[in-house]
Amino acid sequence: MSSDPELERLLRNVRETLPEPGPEASRRARARALAAVRRQRPRRLRTTLVVGSALVVAVALGIGLGALVAPTGTAARALGVGFLPEPGWYALQAAAPATPTQPQVIMSANVPFAPDDAVLGEAEPSGLPYSTLLMLPPKGIVIVATFTQQDHLGLLRSQTTSASQRARALPPLYPERDVPFRMSDATPFIQFGTQVRPEEPLGQYQLRASLEDWYVDVHVYFGAARPPEALLAEAQRQLDRMVVRTAPRRDERQVTRPAVSQAPSAPGIVDRTFACRPSLAGGARKLDTLARRGSGRRGQSWVRPALAGVTTNISGSAATAVDNYLVWVGTGRPSAEAMVPTGPFVLFDFPFRVWGTLAVNRTRCRAATGRVALSRRGLVGGEAGVFPEEFDCTTSSVVLVRIRAVTESRTTLKTYRNFVRTVVPVKEASIAVQTQAGRRLSFAQLSESGKSRIFVAQPPCFPG
């Protein structure tokens, strides 16, 4: 679906004269488009081929030429969405399509995206291009749209077949709308103190919509807290270039299976010790140690992998809540929708497959050489449940944390935002925490089977 008649006419003409691109052509076009974005060509060169560049980006987004002009009445079954960027704009799409528990994410900006906000050339699936927003100039604009299946949010469409029934069943926060979405329907929003850049506030607008079988959340960020009309109009022009397509039903698609499967590589071992600084709260240094068992197993993957971690009070914003972790490790293969838990009020997603199966906060921890025994001697505890078992500990200004993990394949810890991490699945792991003087505080063990155990010293650690 597209609202630009001239663009639709040009695309239809192209479709009549050119064959549909095959898988190999799509792969090459996508690689070339992403390489062009990374090279960041001068603005005047990007403005020369409007229609041609739109087609390249469309192919790179996985949107077929015929899909761009699909009728609006087509029932949404699986989703392919993206932005045809205005000249001077950039577009990203999350690698994973929408699933019942993981929204589809697309982004567009009139500034280059920061490297941290792209994972292997795709949009970071949390839906928050945080690094780009932190550096957004006064005339900068970033648009993020997420598409979530309505059935996942409790709408029983199988029982509401008519348009009037669907309208009565829709939550009031998601009114029925059609593309193009209008900036005039968006409202300024600051939810739960989540101004992304409080020291230099952004203009933040939100639009909610129900589009066929999807709930859509559109967030528009401006580098100026009160964007002028010219910026609002520029954002509207880019919203006009959002395209949506739907995929055929499962029984309409050709199901293929891989001819061969790759044998797993040799397992690896990560065994590192860090000196970490807990935050100061109420005149005392405090940290929380936690663990949970795995749940939601689906074949070889886990929706909620077994987890152990150590947190402290660093971030007061939901947008950066993951920064409260000093370390964490999750065992077993995380599913695409598996998220690092950040508290009872989840406003932003932090997928394991992006943020890491094992991660260490590099702003609060540094490599250390102290000896830390992987032992529960002198500690009390036992099996952890499916909900995190948390213990608050009062401690000294620096603690030693040792992590030992057996990974499915050899790996190293690489920098990602405020962490060093690996995304390789972990088979089994242990985390031990002690003071620099050698007093044990906590010990956790977990395995890919989902089992998890946690032990703590009492005092100074007590149930949270």
Image (cartoon, rainbow, N blue to C red):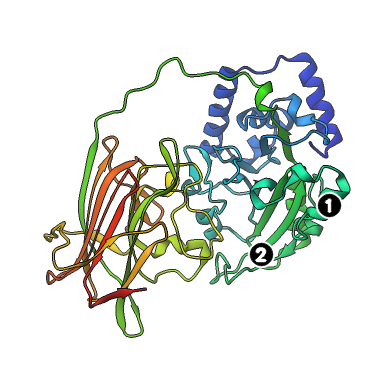
Q: Which residue is mark 2?
A: 203
Q: Amino acid at mark 2?
A: Gly
Task: Please give the name of the residue rendered at 59% of the width and 71% of the height, measured from the top-left corner.
Answer: 192
Which x, y percent locates residue 47? 69, 37
**Looking at the image, which residue sits at the far right?**
164
Task: Check disc 1 and report the residue beneath it.
Answer: 167
Residue 309: x %, y % from top left: 33, 59
What residue is at 56 percent from the left and 69 percent from the top? 200
Which of the 4 quarters of the picture holds residue 170?
bottom right
Q: Check disc 2 and report its element: helix, strand or loop.
A: strand
Does residue 43 appear left or right of residue 426 in this picture?
right
For marks 1 and 2, give the CA distance.
Answer: 31 Å
First-in-chain label (1 vs 2): 1
Can see residue 240?
Answer: no
- Residue 298 in percent (x, y) is at 46, 39
Q: Three-letter amino acid code at disc 1?
A: Ala
The quadrant of the image that shows the N terminus is top right
Q: Residues within 10 Å of mark 2 (few under 14, many from 20)?
A: many
Q: Quadrant of residue 123?
A: top right
